[in-house]
Amino acid sequence: MADGKTRIKSYRLEAPDGGWGILVCIGMALPFISALAALPSFGLVFGDFLKSIGAETSAIAIITSAFFCSLSFAGLFSGSLFRRWSMRSVGLAGGILYCLGTGLQLFATSTMHLIFAFSVVQGLGFGLIVPTSYTTFNNYFVKNRVLWMSFAQTLIGLGSMLYPIVMQKLIQYYGFRGCLLVLTGLNAHAILGMLLMHPVEWHMRRVPIPEEELQLQRQEQQQRQPVAIHIQPETPLTAPVGEMTFITDSSSRRISHADDQILRIISSRASSITSLGNWSGPVIVSDASPQMLHSLQASRRQSTVVPAVGLPPQLPSLPEAGVDETPKKSWVRTLVDFLDLTLFKQVIYVNIVLGITFALYSDITFFTLQPVYLFELGYNKLDTATIIAIGAAADLASRIFLAATAVCIQVPSRYIYLAGAVVTVFARFAFNSITDFVGMASITAIMGFLRTWLHVPLPLVFADYLPKERFASGYGLFMFTQGNAMFVIGPIVGYIRDKTQDYILVFHILNVFMMLCAVPWVIEVLCVKFRRRNKIERQNVDHLDDEQNGRQQNIAH
Protein backbone atom coordinates (compact mmCIF):
# COMPACT_ATOMS: atom_id res chain seq x y z
CA MET A 1 0.00 0.00 0.00
CA ALA A 2 1.31 3.42 -0.98
CA ASP A 3 -0.74 6.63 -0.61
CA GLY A 4 -3.87 4.56 -0.03
CA LYS A 5 -3.57 2.93 -3.47
CA THR A 6 -2.48 -0.57 -4.41
CA ARG A 7 0.51 -0.47 -6.73
CA ILE A 8 0.16 -2.90 -9.62
CA LYS A 9 3.40 -4.37 -10.99
CA SER A 10 3.96 -4.48 -14.73
CA TYR A 11 5.74 -7.34 -16.44
CA ARG A 12 7.24 -8.06 -19.83
CA LEU A 13 7.66 -11.48 -21.45
CA GLU A 14 11.21 -12.42 -22.47
CA ALA A 15 12.83 -15.46 -24.06
CA PRO A 16 13.93 -18.09 -21.51
CA ASP A 17 17.68 -18.04 -22.43
CA GLY A 18 17.90 -21.35 -20.60
CA GLY A 19 15.30 -23.49 -18.86
CA TRP A 20 13.50 -25.61 -21.43
CA GLY A 21 15.89 -24.19 -24.01
CA ILE A 22 18.55 -26.62 -22.72
CA LEU A 23 16.28 -29.51 -23.73
CA VAL A 24 15.84 -27.80 -27.10
CA CYS A 25 19.64 -27.94 -27.52
CA ILE A 26 19.61 -31.66 -26.68
CA GLY A 27 16.65 -32.25 -29.00
CA MET A 28 18.55 -30.51 -31.81
CA ALA A 29 21.68 -32.59 -31.18
CA LEU A 30 19.88 -35.97 -31.38
CA PRO A 31 19.07 -35.95 -35.14
CA PHE A 32 22.14 -33.86 -36.05
CA ILE A 33 24.55 -36.48 -34.66
CA SER A 34 23.20 -39.30 -36.83
CA ALA A 35 22.70 -37.12 -39.92
CA LEU A 36 26.02 -35.24 -39.95
CA ALA A 37 28.07 -38.29 -38.94
CA ALA A 38 26.30 -40.56 -41.44
CA LEU A 39 27.80 -38.84 -44.51
CA PRO A 40 31.50 -39.33 -43.63
CA SER A 41 30.70 -42.90 -42.46
CA PHE A 42 28.55 -43.76 -45.50
CA GLY A 43 31.35 -45.71 -47.15
CA LEU A 44 32.02 -47.59 -43.90
CA VAL A 45 28.40 -48.77 -43.60
CA PHE A 46 27.45 -49.26 -47.27
CA GLY A 47 30.85 -49.86 -48.92
CA ASP A 48 30.71 -53.69 -48.92
CA PHE A 49 27.04 -53.68 -49.94
CA LEU A 50 27.75 -51.44 -52.96
CA LYS A 51 30.61 -53.71 -54.03
CA SER A 52 28.39 -56.76 -53.73
CA ILE A 53 25.81 -55.28 -56.15
CA GLY A 54 28.52 -54.15 -58.57
CA ALA A 55 28.16 -50.43 -57.93
CA GLU A 56 31.20 -48.25 -58.49
CA THR A 57 32.63 -45.90 -55.91
CA SER A 58 31.08 -43.01 -57.86
CA ALA A 59 27.69 -44.22 -56.56
CA ILE A 60 28.60 -42.80 -53.14
CA ALA A 61 29.11 -39.34 -54.66
CA ILE A 62 25.79 -39.57 -56.50
CA ILE A 63 23.88 -40.69 -53.39
CA THR A 64 25.37 -37.98 -51.15
CA SER A 65 24.82 -35.27 -53.79
CA ALA A 66 21.18 -36.32 -54.15
CA PHE A 67 20.86 -36.19 -50.36
CA PHE A 68 21.95 -32.53 -50.33
CA CYS A 69 19.60 -31.78 -53.23
CA SER A 70 16.59 -33.19 -51.33
CA LEU A 71 17.75 -31.37 -48.22
CA SER A 72 17.82 -28.06 -50.09
CA PHE A 73 14.32 -28.43 -51.56
CA ALA A 74 12.83 -29.30 -48.17
CA GLY A 75 14.52 -26.29 -46.63
CA LEU A 76 13.20 -24.05 -49.41
CA PHE A 77 9.57 -24.78 -48.52
CA SER A 78 10.05 -24.90 -44.74
CA GLY A 79 9.13 -21.23 -44.21
CA SER A 80 5.84 -21.68 -46.09
CA LEU A 81 5.09 -24.86 -44.13
CA PHE A 82 5.68 -23.01 -40.84
CA ARG A 83 3.09 -20.43 -41.86
CA ARG A 84 0.53 -23.15 -42.56
CA TRP A 85 1.31 -25.52 -39.68
CA SER A 86 3.24 -25.19 -36.44
CA MET A 87 7.03 -25.58 -36.40
CA ARG A 88 6.77 -28.52 -34.04
CA SER A 89 4.40 -30.36 -36.40
CA VAL A 90 6.70 -29.79 -39.39
CA GLY A 91 9.72 -30.93 -37.38
CA LEU A 92 7.85 -34.01 -36.18
CA ALA A 93 7.01 -34.89 -39.79
CA GLY A 94 10.70 -34.50 -40.62
CA GLY A 95 11.69 -36.82 -37.77
CA ILE A 96 9.24 -39.47 -38.93
CA LEU A 97 10.52 -39.25 -42.52
CA TYR A 98 14.11 -39.48 -41.33
CA CYS A 99 13.42 -42.61 -39.29
CA LEU A 100 11.32 -44.09 -42.12
CA GLY A 101 14.14 -43.59 -44.61
CA THR A 102 16.53 -45.59 -42.41
CA GLY A 103 13.96 -48.36 -42.11
CA LEU A 104 13.49 -48.53 -45.89
CA GLN A 105 17.24 -49.08 -46.32
CA LEU A 106 16.79 -52.49 -44.68
CA PHE A 107 15.11 -53.71 -47.88
CA ALA A 108 17.51 -52.05 -50.35
CA THR A 109 18.82 -54.31 -53.12
CA SER A 110 20.09 -51.73 -55.63
CA THR A 111 21.55 -48.26 -55.91
CA MET A 112 18.18 -46.81 -56.86
CA HIS A 113 16.69 -48.17 -53.64
CA LEU A 114 19.40 -46.42 -51.65
CA ILE A 115 18.88 -43.16 -53.55
CA PHE A 116 15.17 -43.26 -52.74
CA ALA A 117 15.53 -44.31 -49.08
CA PHE A 118 18.66 -42.40 -48.08
CA SER A 119 18.79 -39.44 -50.46
CA VAL A 120 15.10 -38.65 -51.01
CA VAL A 121 13.22 -39.75 -47.87
CA GLN A 122 15.97 -39.13 -45.32
CA GLY A 123 17.10 -35.98 -47.12
CA LEU A 124 13.59 -34.50 -47.08
CA GLY A 125 13.20 -35.42 -43.40
CA PHE A 126 16.47 -33.82 -42.36
CA GLY A 127 15.66 -30.81 -44.53
CA LEU A 128 12.59 -30.21 -42.34
CA ILE A 129 14.48 -30.91 -39.10
CA VAL A 130 17.24 -28.34 -39.69
CA PRO A 131 15.11 -25.14 -40.02
CA THR A 132 12.78 -26.34 -37.26
CA SER A 133 15.67 -26.82 -34.86
CA TYR A 134 17.47 -23.59 -35.69
CA THR A 135 14.29 -21.48 -35.67
CA THR A 136 13.20 -22.88 -32.30
CA PHE A 137 16.69 -22.32 -30.91
CA ASN A 138 16.62 -18.76 -32.22
CA ASN A 139 13.34 -18.14 -30.39
CA TYR A 140 14.57 -19.55 -27.07
CA PHE A 141 17.94 -17.78 -26.91
CA VAL A 142 18.61 -14.08 -27.42
CA LYS A 143 21.44 -13.01 -25.09
CA ASN A 144 23.59 -16.19 -24.94
CA ARG A 145 23.17 -17.70 -28.39
CA VAL A 146 26.85 -18.40 -29.01
CA LEU A 147 27.22 -20.10 -25.61
CA TRP A 148 24.30 -22.49 -26.03
CA MET A 149 24.93 -23.14 -29.72
CA SER A 150 28.48 -24.11 -28.76
CA PHE A 151 27.01 -26.43 -26.11
CA ALA A 152 24.75 -28.09 -28.70
CA GLN A 153 27.58 -28.33 -31.23
CA THR A 154 29.83 -29.89 -28.59
CA LEU A 155 27.24 -32.63 -28.08
CA ILE A 156 27.11 -33.10 -31.85
CA GLY A 157 30.91 -33.24 -32.01
CA LEU A 158 31.10 -35.90 -29.28
CA GLY A 159 28.42 -37.98 -30.99
CA SER A 160 30.11 -37.65 -34.38
CA MET A 161 33.39 -38.93 -32.93
CA LEU A 162 31.68 -42.01 -31.45
CA TYR A 163 29.43 -42.69 -34.47
CA PRO A 164 31.96 -44.46 -36.77
CA ILE A 165 33.24 -46.59 -33.88
CA VAL A 166 29.69 -47.67 -33.02
CA MET A 167 28.88 -48.43 -36.67
CA GLN A 168 32.01 -50.55 -37.06
CA LYS A 169 31.14 -52.58 -33.96
CA LEU A 170 27.52 -53.05 -35.08
CA ILE A 171 28.59 -54.35 -38.50
CA GLN A 172 31.12 -56.64 -36.84
CA TYR A 173 28.56 -58.14 -34.42
CA TYR A 174 25.26 -58.02 -36.40
CA GLY A 175 26.21 -57.67 -40.05
CA PHE A 176 24.96 -55.12 -42.60
CA ARG A 177 21.19 -55.63 -42.17
CA GLY A 178 21.41 -55.95 -38.40
CA CYS A 179 23.42 -52.73 -38.22
CA LEU A 180 20.71 -50.91 -40.22
CA LEU A 181 18.01 -52.29 -37.90
CA VAL A 182 19.78 -50.92 -34.82
CA LEU A 183 20.48 -47.67 -36.70
CA THR A 184 16.74 -47.31 -37.37
CA GLY A 185 16.11 -47.40 -33.64
CA LEU A 186 18.87 -44.84 -33.02
CA ASN A 187 17.50 -42.50 -35.69
CA ALA A 188 14.04 -42.76 -34.11
CA HIS A 189 15.45 -40.39 -31.48
CA ALA A 190 14.97 -37.67 -34.10
CA ILE A 191 11.23 -37.92 -33.34
CA LEU A 192 11.98 -37.48 -29.63
CA GLY A 193 14.16 -34.49 -30.43
CA MET A 194 11.38 -32.81 -32.42
CA LEU A 195 8.88 -33.47 -29.62
CA LEU A 196 11.12 -31.35 -27.38
CA MET A 197 10.69 -28.35 -29.72
CA HIS A 198 7.97 -26.70 -27.63
CA PRO A 199 6.69 -23.30 -28.77
CA VAL A 200 8.60 -20.62 -26.91
CA GLU A 201 5.30 -19.08 -25.74
CA TRP A 202 4.94 -22.04 -23.35
CA HIS A 203 8.10 -21.11 -21.47
CA MET A 204 8.41 -17.31 -21.65
CA ARG A 205 9.77 -15.58 -18.54
CA ARG A 206 7.80 -12.84 -16.75
CA VAL A 207 10.29 -10.08 -15.97
CA PRO A 208 9.16 -7.11 -13.81
CA ILE A 209 9.52 -3.73 -15.50
CA PRO A 210 11.51 -1.30 -13.30
CA GLU A 211 9.61 1.69 -11.95
CA GLU A 212 12.12 4.08 -13.57
CA GLU A 213 11.41 2.62 -16.99
CA LEU A 214 7.65 2.89 -16.44
CA GLN A 215 7.97 6.54 -15.45
CA LEU A 216 10.07 7.21 -18.55
CA GLN A 217 7.38 5.62 -20.73
CA ARG A 218 4.69 7.75 -19.07
CA GLN A 219 6.73 10.90 -19.67
CA GLU A 220 7.19 10.01 -23.32
CA GLN A 221 3.43 9.51 -23.69
CA GLN A 222 2.69 12.85 -22.05
CA GLN A 223 5.21 14.65 -24.26
CA ARG A 224 3.62 13.50 -27.52
CA GLN A 225 3.00 16.32 -29.95
CA PRO A 226 -0.63 17.47 -30.32
CA VAL A 227 -2.56 16.45 -33.40
CA ALA A 228 -2.75 19.14 -36.08
CA ILE A 229 -5.94 19.34 -38.16
CA HIS A 230 -5.59 20.87 -41.62
CA ILE A 231 -8.69 21.83 -43.59
CA GLN A 232 -8.81 21.44 -47.35
CA PRO A 233 -11.97 23.11 -48.76
CA GLU A 234 -11.38 21.98 -52.33
CA THR A 235 -13.71 18.99 -52.11
CA PRO A 236 -17.00 19.85 -50.41
CA LEU A 237 -19.31 17.20 -49.01
CA THR A 238 -23.08 17.12 -49.40
CA ALA A 239 -23.62 16.56 -45.70
CA PRO A 240 -22.11 18.72 -42.95
CA VAL A 241 -19.42 16.89 -41.03
CA GLY A 242 -19.65 19.14 -38.04
CA GLU A 243 -21.78 16.61 -36.16
CA MET A 244 -20.77 13.28 -37.66
CA THR A 245 -20.61 10.08 -35.63
CA PHE A 246 -18.83 6.80 -36.33
CA ILE A 247 -21.07 3.74 -36.49
CA THR A 248 -19.40 0.35 -37.13
CA ASP A 249 -21.21 -2.61 -38.57
CA SER A 250 -21.39 -6.01 -36.93
CA SER A 251 -18.58 -7.44 -39.04
CA SER A 252 -16.04 -4.80 -38.03
CA ARG A 253 -13.41 -5.59 -35.42
CA ARG A 254 -13.64 -3.96 -31.97
CA ILE A 255 -11.27 -1.06 -31.51
CA SER A 256 -9.49 -0.40 -28.24
CA HIS A 257 -10.58 2.20 -25.70
CA ALA A 258 -7.56 4.36 -26.58
CA ASP A 259 -8.43 4.30 -30.29
CA ASP A 260 -12.05 5.16 -29.45
CA GLN A 261 -10.87 8.20 -27.47
CA ILE A 262 -8.68 9.27 -30.40
CA LEU A 263 -11.65 9.09 -32.76
CA ARG A 264 -13.77 11.12 -30.35
CA ILE A 265 -11.09 13.81 -30.07
CA ILE A 266 -10.77 14.06 -33.84
CA SER A 267 -14.53 14.23 -34.27
CA SER A 268 -14.86 16.95 -31.61
CA ARG A 269 -12.02 18.97 -33.12
CA ALA A 270 -13.58 18.70 -36.56
CA SER A 271 -16.88 19.88 -35.08
CA SER A 272 -15.31 22.90 -33.40
CA ILE A 273 -13.53 23.92 -36.60
CA THR A 274 -16.45 23.53 -38.98
CA SER A 275 -18.92 25.18 -36.60
CA LEU A 276 -17.12 28.49 -37.11
CA GLY A 277 -18.99 28.79 -40.38
CA ASN A 278 -21.23 26.88 -42.73
CA TRP A 279 -18.16 25.37 -44.49
CA SER A 280 -18.12 21.66 -45.08
CA GLY A 281 -15.11 19.73 -46.32
CA PRO A 282 -12.93 16.74 -45.61
CA VAL A 283 -10.85 16.64 -42.47
CA ILE A 284 -7.20 15.72 -43.10
CA VAL A 285 -5.11 14.52 -40.16
CA SER A 286 -1.50 15.07 -41.14
CA ASP A 287 0.47 14.86 -37.91
CA ALA A 288 -1.21 11.88 -36.29
CA SER A 289 0.60 8.95 -34.72
CA PRO A 290 0.81 5.63 -36.65
CA GLN A 291 -1.68 4.04 -34.26
CA MET A 292 -4.14 6.86 -34.93
CA LEU A 293 -3.75 6.59 -38.67
CA HIS A 294 -4.26 2.83 -38.47
CA SER A 295 -7.44 3.33 -36.45
CA LEU A 296 -8.75 5.91 -38.89
CA GLN A 297 -8.03 3.72 -41.89
CA ALA A 298 -9.75 0.79 -40.24
CA SER A 299 -12.77 2.91 -39.35
CA ARG A 300 -13.01 4.30 -42.89
CA ARG A 301 -13.04 0.81 -44.33
CA GLN A 302 -15.52 -0.65 -41.88
CA SER A 303 -17.68 2.33 -40.86
CA THR A 304 -20.51 4.41 -42.23
CA VAL A 305 -20.56 8.19 -41.70
CA VAL A 306 -24.03 9.26 -40.55
CA PRO A 307 -24.96 12.91 -39.97
CA ALA A 308 -26.92 13.54 -36.79
CA VAL A 309 -29.50 15.84 -38.40
CA GLY A 310 -31.69 13.05 -39.71
CA LEU A 311 -30.31 12.86 -43.23
CA PRO A 312 -30.02 9.38 -44.76
CA PRO A 313 -26.65 7.73 -44.31
CA GLN A 314 -24.15 7.89 -47.17
CA LEU A 315 -23.37 4.29 -47.98
CA PRO A 316 -20.18 3.41 -49.83
CA SER A 317 -20.61 2.56 -53.48
CA LEU A 318 -20.87 -1.16 -54.15
CA PRO A 319 -19.24 -2.94 -57.09
CA GLU A 320 -21.48 -4.04 -59.90
CA ALA A 321 -22.88 -7.53 -59.83
CA GLY A 322 -20.49 -10.13 -61.22
CA VAL A 323 -17.49 -7.78 -61.17
CA ASP A 324 -14.57 -8.78 -58.92
CA GLU A 325 -12.54 -5.70 -58.10
CA THR A 326 -9.95 -7.63 -56.03
CA PRO A 327 -6.60 -7.36 -57.82
CA LYS A 328 -5.32 -10.78 -58.82
CA LYS A 329 -1.68 -11.69 -58.30
CA SER A 330 0.28 -13.20 -61.12
CA TRP A 331 1.73 -16.65 -60.56
CA VAL A 332 5.20 -15.14 -60.41
CA ARG A 333 4.20 -12.74 -57.63
CA THR A 334 2.45 -15.57 -55.78
CA LEU A 335 5.61 -17.69 -55.95
CA VAL A 336 7.77 -14.78 -54.77
CA ASP A 337 5.50 -14.16 -51.76
CA PHE A 338 5.17 -17.89 -51.01
CA LEU A 339 8.94 -18.46 -50.87
CA ASP A 340 9.83 -14.97 -49.57
CA LEU A 341 12.17 -14.45 -52.53
CA THR A 342 12.25 -10.69 -51.88
CA LEU A 343 15.10 -11.44 -49.47
CA PHE A 344 17.36 -11.70 -52.50
CA LYS A 345 16.87 -7.95 -53.03
CA GLN A 346 18.93 -7.34 -49.89
CA VAL A 347 22.60 -7.14 -50.85
CA ILE A 348 23.86 -8.05 -47.38
CA TYR A 349 21.68 -11.17 -47.27
CA VAL A 350 22.94 -12.30 -50.69
CA ASN A 351 26.52 -11.70 -49.55
CA ILE A 352 25.92 -13.82 -46.45
CA VAL A 353 24.31 -16.68 -48.40
CA LEU A 354 26.97 -16.84 -51.13
CA GLY A 355 29.84 -16.46 -48.67
CA ILE A 356 28.70 -19.28 -46.38
CA THR A 357 27.82 -21.47 -49.38
CA PHE A 358 31.34 -21.19 -50.83
CA ALA A 359 32.99 -21.58 -47.41
CA LEU A 360 31.00 -24.71 -46.53
CA TYR A 361 31.71 -26.34 -49.88
CA SER A 362 35.42 -25.57 -49.52
CA ASP A 363 35.53 -26.96 -45.97
CA ILE A 364 33.58 -30.17 -46.61
CA THR A 365 35.45 -31.02 -49.82
CA PHE A 366 38.87 -30.27 -48.33
CA PHE A 367 38.47 -32.61 -45.36
CA THR A 368 36.99 -35.28 -47.65
CA LEU A 369 40.06 -35.18 -49.93
CA GLN A 370 42.67 -34.87 -47.18
CA PRO A 371 42.87 -38.64 -46.34
CA VAL A 372 43.30 -39.51 -50.03
CA TYR A 373 46.03 -36.86 -50.35
CA LEU A 374 47.84 -38.30 -47.33
CA PHE A 375 47.82 -41.73 -48.95
CA GLU A 376 49.32 -40.14 -52.07
CA LEU A 377 52.15 -38.74 -49.92
CA GLY A 378 52.94 -42.25 -48.67
CA TYR A 379 51.28 -42.22 -45.26
CA ASN A 380 49.97 -45.56 -44.03
CA LYS A 381 46.47 -46.08 -42.60
CA LEU A 382 47.60 -45.74 -38.98
CA ASP A 383 49.36 -42.41 -39.55
CA THR A 384 46.45 -41.11 -41.64
CA ALA A 385 43.92 -42.12 -38.97
CA THR A 386 46.08 -40.47 -36.29
CA ILE A 387 46.22 -37.16 -38.19
CA ILE A 388 42.46 -37.20 -38.80
CA ALA A 389 41.85 -37.99 -35.11
CA ILE A 390 44.07 -35.05 -34.10
CA GLY A 391 41.99 -32.74 -36.31
CA ALA A 392 38.74 -34.08 -34.79
CA ALA A 393 40.10 -33.59 -31.26
CA ALA A 394 41.10 -30.01 -32.09
CA ASP A 395 37.59 -29.43 -33.48
CA LEU A 396 36.04 -30.66 -30.22
CA ALA A 397 38.44 -28.57 -28.13
CA SER A 398 37.52 -25.51 -30.19
CA ARG A 399 33.82 -26.07 -29.52
CA ILE A 400 34.47 -26.15 -25.78
CA PHE A 401 36.72 -23.09 -26.05
CA LEU A 402 34.06 -21.17 -27.97
CA ALA A 403 31.42 -22.03 -25.37
CA ALA A 404 33.70 -20.92 -22.51
CA THR A 405 34.72 -17.62 -24.10
CA ALA A 406 31.11 -16.80 -24.99
CA VAL A 407 30.39 -16.50 -21.25
CA CYS A 408 32.87 -13.62 -20.88
CA ILE A 409 33.10 -12.07 -24.35
CA GLN A 410 30.16 -11.28 -26.64
CA VAL A 411 31.40 -11.24 -30.24
CA PRO A 412 28.98 -11.00 -33.21
CA SER A 413 28.59 -14.39 -34.84
CA ARG A 414 29.44 -13.06 -38.27
CA TYR A 415 32.78 -11.72 -37.05
CA ILE A 416 33.61 -15.17 -35.65
CA TYR A 417 32.75 -16.75 -38.99
CA LEU A 418 34.78 -14.14 -40.88
CA ALA A 419 37.81 -14.66 -38.62
CA GLY A 420 37.62 -18.42 -39.18
CA ALA A 421 37.45 -17.98 -42.96
CA VAL A 422 40.36 -15.52 -43.12
CA VAL A 423 42.73 -17.56 -40.93
CA THR A 424 41.75 -20.77 -42.74
CA VAL A 425 42.90 -19.26 -46.03
CA PHE A 426 46.40 -18.69 -44.63
CA ALA A 427 46.46 -22.10 -42.93
CA ARG A 428 45.61 -23.80 -46.25
CA PHE A 429 48.55 -22.09 -47.96
CA ALA A 430 50.83 -23.47 -45.24
CA PHE A 431 49.27 -26.93 -45.57
CA ASN A 432 50.19 -27.14 -49.26
CA SER A 433 53.91 -26.88 -48.47
CA ILE A 434 54.05 -29.43 -45.61
CA THR A 435 54.84 -33.13 -46.06
CA ASP A 436 56.37 -34.41 -42.78
CA PHE A 437 54.22 -36.09 -40.12
CA VAL A 438 54.72 -33.58 -37.28
CA GLY A 439 54.06 -30.57 -39.52
CA MET A 440 51.00 -32.24 -41.09
CA ALA A 441 49.57 -33.13 -37.67
CA SER A 442 50.15 -29.58 -36.42
CA ILE A 443 48.56 -27.81 -39.39
CA THR A 444 45.62 -30.26 -39.34
CA ALA A 445 45.06 -29.44 -35.66
CA ILE A 446 45.03 -25.71 -36.51
CA MET A 447 42.53 -26.21 -39.36
CA GLY A 448 40.40 -28.49 -37.17
CA PHE A 449 40.33 -25.80 -34.48
CA LEU A 450 39.26 -23.19 -37.06
CA ARG A 451 36.64 -25.50 -38.55
CA THR A 452 34.45 -24.96 -35.49
CA TRP A 453 34.37 -21.23 -36.25
CA LEU A 454 32.77 -22.06 -39.61
CA HIS A 455 30.12 -24.47 -38.32
CA VAL A 456 29.03 -23.33 -34.84
CA PRO A 457 28.09 -19.69 -35.66
CA LEU A 458 26.55 -20.56 -39.06
CA PRO A 459 22.85 -20.44 -38.06
CA LEU A 460 23.55 -17.55 -35.68
CA VAL A 461 24.77 -15.39 -38.58
CA PHE A 462 21.28 -15.62 -40.10
CA ALA A 463 19.60 -15.24 -36.69
CA ASP A 464 21.47 -11.98 -36.03
CA TYR A 465 20.61 -10.50 -39.43
CA LEU A 466 17.05 -11.70 -40.10
CA PRO A 467 13.96 -10.89 -38.00
CA LYS A 468 12.41 -13.87 -36.26
CA GLU A 469 9.41 -14.04 -38.60
CA ARG A 470 11.69 -14.32 -41.65
CA PHE A 471 14.39 -16.58 -40.22
CA ALA A 472 12.81 -19.85 -41.38
CA SER A 473 12.29 -18.72 -44.97
CA GLY A 474 15.69 -16.99 -45.05
CA TYR A 475 17.53 -20.06 -43.80
CA GLY A 476 15.50 -22.26 -46.14
CA LEU A 477 16.60 -20.18 -49.13
CA PHE A 478 20.20 -20.57 -47.97
CA MET A 479 19.78 -24.36 -47.72
CA PHE A 480 18.37 -24.42 -51.25
CA THR A 481 21.24 -22.32 -52.61
CA GLN A 482 23.90 -24.28 -50.78
CA GLY A 483 22.55 -27.72 -51.74
CA ASN A 484 22.28 -26.90 -55.43
CA ALA A 485 25.66 -25.15 -55.46
CA MET A 486 27.32 -28.28 -54.09
CA PHE A 487 25.41 -30.35 -56.64
CA VAL A 488 26.74 -28.18 -59.50
CA ILE A 489 30.27 -27.29 -58.33
CA GLY A 490 31.15 -30.74 -56.94
CA PRO A 491 31.31 -32.61 -60.27
CA ILE A 492 33.34 -29.79 -61.86
CA VAL A 493 36.03 -29.90 -59.16
CA GLY A 494 35.94 -33.71 -59.26
CA TYR A 495 36.50 -33.67 -63.03
CA ILE A 496 39.52 -31.37 -62.61
CA ARG A 497 40.96 -33.70 -59.98
CA ASP A 498 40.47 -36.81 -62.14
CA LYS A 499 41.99 -35.17 -65.22
CA THR A 500 45.01 -33.57 -63.57
CA GLN A 501 45.57 -35.90 -60.58
CA ASP A 502 47.05 -32.79 -58.95
CA TYR A 503 45.71 -32.44 -55.41
CA ILE A 504 47.64 -29.23 -54.76
CA LEU A 505 45.81 -27.57 -57.68
CA VAL A 506 42.47 -28.74 -56.26
CA PHE A 507 43.39 -27.41 -52.80
CA HIS A 508 44.23 -24.03 -54.36
CA ILE A 509 40.81 -24.01 -56.08
CA LEU A 510 39.13 -24.80 -52.75
CA ASN A 511 41.09 -21.99 -51.14
CA VAL A 512 39.75 -19.61 -53.78
CA PHE A 513 36.22 -20.62 -52.78
CA MET A 514 37.09 -19.85 -49.14
CA MET A 515 38.40 -16.45 -50.26
CA LEU A 516 35.06 -15.82 -52.02
CA CYS A 517 33.59 -15.77 -48.52
CA ALA A 518 36.33 -13.79 -46.75
CA VAL A 519 37.07 -11.03 -49.30
CA PRO A 520 33.47 -9.84 -50.02
CA TRP A 521 32.66 -9.88 -46.29
CA VAL A 522 35.72 -7.76 -45.47
CA ILE A 523 34.75 -5.31 -48.23
CA GLU A 524 31.20 -5.13 -46.85
CA VAL A 525 32.41 -4.45 -43.30
CA LEU A 526 34.70 -1.66 -44.52
CA CYS A 527 31.95 -0.10 -46.68
CA VAL A 528 29.41 -0.17 -43.83
CA LYS A 529 31.86 1.42 -41.39
CA PHE A 530 32.87 4.06 -43.96
CA ARG A 531 29.25 5.01 -44.66
CA ARG A 532 28.44 5.12 -40.96
CA ARG A 533 31.39 7.40 -40.27
CA ASN A 534 30.41 9.72 -43.13
CA LYS A 535 26.84 9.85 -41.84
CA ILE A 536 28.02 10.78 -38.35
CA GLU A 537 30.30 13.47 -39.78
CA ARG A 538 27.44 14.92 -41.85
CA GLN A 539 25.19 14.97 -38.79
CA ASN A 540 27.87 16.78 -36.80
CA VAL A 541 28.32 19.36 -39.57
CA ASP A 542 24.55 19.92 -39.79
CA HIS A 543 24.40 20.33 -36.02
CA LEU A 544 27.18 22.93 -36.08
CA ASP A 545 25.43 24.80 -38.92
CA ASP A 546 22.18 24.86 -36.94
CA GLU A 547 23.99 26.25 -33.90
CA GLN A 548 25.66 28.96 -35.99
CA ASN A 549 22.36 29.92 -37.61
CA GLY A 550 20.74 30.12 -34.20
CA ARG A 551 23.46 32.39 -32.89
CA GLN A 552 23.16 34.68 -35.91
CA GLN A 553 19.38 34.94 -35.43
CA ASN A 554 19.86 35.80 -31.77
CA ILE A 555 22.38 38.50 -32.68
CA ALA A 556 19.99 39.93 -35.32
CA HIS A 557 17.16 40.12 -32.76
Image (spheres, helix red, strand yellow):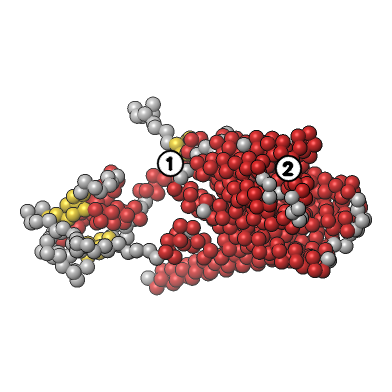
Q: Is residue 510 left or right of residue 132?
A: right
Q: Position of residue 289 (x, y in %)?
A: 34, 55
Q: Which mark is residue 214?
A: 1
Which residue is depicted at the point 76% across and 55% down? Answer: 57
Examine the image and state in which quarter residue 522 appears: bottom right
Q: Along the horizontal axis of the image, is 300 left or right of 375?
A: left
Query: Mark 2 or mark 1: which comes first in sequence?
Result: 2
Horizontal and vertical percent position of residue 462: 58, 54
Which part of the image, by quadrant, shows the C terminus? bottom left
Q: Residues within 10 Å of mark 2 (few under 14, many from 20)?
A: many
Residue 453 in the image: above or below residue 164 = below
- 2 vs 1, front mark: 2
Question: Is residue 252 at least partly visible in the picture?
Answer: yes
Nearer to us in this view, 422 or 517: 517
Mark 2 belongs to which amino acid? Ser
Tag 1, which secondary structure? helix
489 sits left or right of 134 in the view: right
